[in-house]
Each structure stands twice: as C-alpha cells, then as structure tokens.
Amino acid sequence: MPDRPVRQPRRVTITKDGPMLVEGPVEVVLDDGSSVVSDRFTVALCVCHRSRSFPWCDTSHRGRTKRRSV
C-alpha cells in the first residue's frame, strides 16, 4: 500500500459583514457546475453576491449598508 501524504485541513475564516477567507490554493465549484481556481495563499470568497467578480470578493459589500427596520 503506497504512503499517502497527510492532508491538513484548510482554514476558513468567516468575517462579519464581509467575505469568507479561505487559505489557498482553492478550486470553487459554482452552482452551474463550472469551476474556478485560485493559487493565491488566501482568497476572499463573496457571500453577499454583490461582487462583479463573483465568486471572488471585490469589496462591493462595503458600498451598501443594511437598512434597519423601524
């Protein structure tokens, strides 16, 4: 039986009102089945769907504030 390298888990950081940070490299599979790859050491994934470069965060979430219901 060949020796397999021990895989370390990826670190994922959830940020308040911001992107999800994932230690790279990563492959992201989109809802249509296509995939995108980044070999950066950390990637910011958009969770608000406002990014023009979705699934990567482009900080578009900063331009809008949430309305408070009165």
Image (cartoon, grey):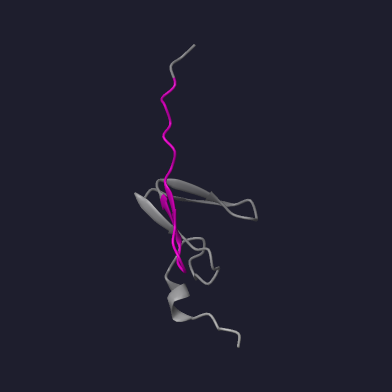
Q: Is residue 19 magenta?
A: yes
**Image spot of residue 48 (x, y percent):** 54, 68
Say if 62 sits above or below 22 in the image: below
Residue 20: horizontal and vertical position, in percent? 46, 58
Residue 55, horizontal then vertical, whole percent? 51, 60
Q: Quadrant of residue 9?
A: top left
Q: Residue at x 47, y 73 (%)?
A: 61
Q: Quadrant of residue 31?
A: bottom right
Q: Main secondary structure of the magenta part?
A: loop
Instruction: Choose top left, top right, bottom left or bottom right for residue 7.
Output: top left
**Residue shown at 41% from the left, 34% from the top:** 8
Residue 50 screen position, x and y as percent? 53, 72
**Magenta-span inclusion, residue 48:** no
Residue placed at 40% from the left, 45% from the top? 25
Number of numbered discs:
0
Q: Report the residue that reaches farthest toward the bottom.
A: 70
Q: Is residue 45 above or below residue 5?
A: below
Judging depth in this view, the residue of 27 and 64 nearest the camera is 64
The stretch of residues the image draws in magenta is 4-22
Is 43 on the left-hand or right-hand side of 35? left
Q: Is residue 57 above or below residue 40?
A: below
Q: Residue at x 49, y 11 (%)?
A: 1
Q: Residue furthest front?
A: 70
Quadrant holding the C terminus: bottom right
